[in-house]
Amino acid sequence: MPVVMRRLRDPDINPCLSESDASTRCMDENNYDRERCSTYFLKYKNCRKFWNSVMVQRRQCGVKPPMPTAAERDEILGALGKMPY
C-alpha cells in the first residue's frame, strides 16, 4: 500500500476515518448516486471542520502534535458528552 494511503487509513492521522468509510460504503451501495449519500457527506464535512478547528486551536496554544492522537480524541469526545458533528 502506498505511503499516502497508509497515512489516510491511520486512525492517529485521520480523525474522520469512520465518516469517510461510511460515505464510501454509501456510494458503493447506492450505485454512486451522490444525492442519496448527502447526509454522509455532510457528516464527513462537519467532522473535518470540527477537528480542523481543534488542530488550529492546539497549534495556537503551542501544543504538539497539533492533531490529537486517537486516544486523545476519544477523551475529547467523551468530555463533550456527544458527537459535535
Image (cartoon, rainbow, N blue to C red):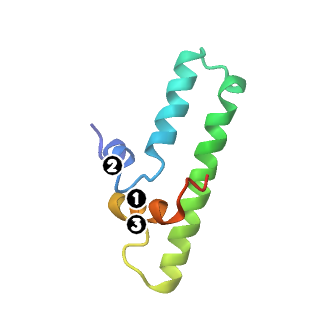
Of the numbered discs 1 and 2, the one sitting upstream in the chain is 2
Distance (Cα) linking label 3 and label 1: 9 Å
Closest to the camera, between mark 1 and mark 2, is 1
Of the numbered discs 2 and 3, the one sitting upstream in the chain is 2
Q: Amino acid at mark 2?
A: Asp
Q: Position of residue 22 (x, y in %)?
A: 51, 33
| 28 shown above or below 69 | above
Secondary structure type for disc 3: loop
Camera-nearest residue between 48 and 72: 72
Closest to the camera, between mark 3 and mark 1, is 1
Identify the image quadrant of residue 32. top right
Of the numbered discs 3 and 1, the one sitting upstream in the chain is 3
Identify the image quadrant of residue 35. top right
Q: Position of residue 42 (x, y in %)?
A: 66, 42
Secondary structure type for disc 2: loop
Camera-nearest residue between 3 and 82: 82
| 21 shown above or below 36 | below
Q: Position of residue 75 (x, y in %)?
A: 40, 64
| Tag of residue 10 | 2
Closest to the camera, between mark 2 and mark 3, is 3
Disc 1, disc 2: CB below 8 Å? Answer: no
Which residue has dot 1 on it? 74
Packing grade of label 3 (10 A; few <14, some 14-19, many >=20) is many
Disc 3, disc 1: CB below 8 Å? Answer: no
User: For the view shown, which residue lies furthest in the left direction?
Assistant: 1
| Tag of residue 68 | 3
Packing grade of label 2 (10 A; few <14, some 14-19, many >=20) is few
Q: Amino acid at mark 1?
A: Asp
Identify the residue shown where x is 35% and y is 42%: 5
Where does the N terminus fall, quadrant-wise? top left
Q: Amino acid at mark 3?
A: Pro
